[in-house]
Amino acid sequence: MLTVHHLNQSRSKRVLWLLEELSMPYNRVDHQRDADTHLAPQSLKDIHPLGKAPVVVAGDLVLCESSAVMEYIIDQDKQKRFRPPQGTPEYYRYLEWSHFAEGSLGLPVISHLLMQKEERNGNCAMDGYIAKEIDVDFSYIESTLGQRDYFAGDTFTAADIMMTLIFEIAESIGLLEERSNILAYLARIRQRPAYQVAASFG
């Protein structure tokens, strides 16, 4: 059985959510961030050298990185649910958005989050770069969600799970205030029972 090492307020929520969507059995081991530093504990580093979540363990396999973990889990499902059939346009959109979440979108959102924690005068090259990337990325997303219900097409996939977590971070720092399509999408996604179970784990 798969073991998920879950860190509170982390990307491991994605893995728990997908497992709940699939009704796939798993063991959950909880790790808590340090109350002062907000860093992961040594117990997680004892499982994987990066000390980051998610980390899953299946026999001799110890795997991290959300997108890779999601692919592994779907491969264990006989029906290969929540991933479009390989070779279809939906499959390649699925891949695009799964990687976009932590690639194109993750950097500016997390950078903006960290930059809010310090005094800035707006004259740094990084400020302009991050502001531009945020506008380009969220304009692209807003347009996409104006054309279809989910990122890969008309059906919910694991790409939606990947994207939702970054949306939640963006929402918490005020980046979604004028993005009506994204906010409507997020409200709809949060109604999914499996999402609600995963969210309850912290």
Image (cartoon, helix red, strand yellow):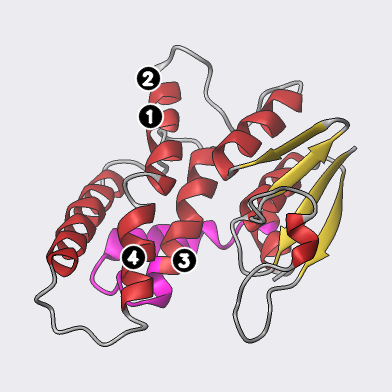
Vertical comparison of 19 with 7: above or below: above
Residue 96 magenta: no
Residue pointed to by mark 4 = 111
Q: Position of residue 35 (x, y in %)?
A: 67, 84
Q: Label 3, label 1: how many angstroms apart (C-alpha)? A: 21 Å
Crowding near the residue tagged with mark 1, few <14, some 14–19, many ≥20 C-alpha atoms within 10 Å: some
Neighbor class of circle 3 (other Cα within 10 Å; few <14, some 14-19, many 20+) is some
Q: Which secondary structure, mark 2?
A: helix
Residue contact between numbered discs 3 and 2, judged by CB atoms under 8 Å: no
Region rendered in magenta: 170-193
- Mark 3 in CB contact with mark 1 (< 8 angstroms): no
**Residue 103 placed where, x, y %?**
37, 44
Q: Is residue 15 visible?
A: yes
Q: Is residue 33 above or below residue 158?
A: below
Magenta residue check for 180 = yes
How far is the residue under mark 4 from the one under mark 3? 15 Å
Q: How many marks?
A: 4
Q: Nearer the viewer, mark 4 or mark 2?
A: 4
Q: Amino acid at mark 3?
A: Glu
Q: Which residue shows up at 43% across the image and 15% down it?
A: 88
- For mark 2, what is the residue? 89
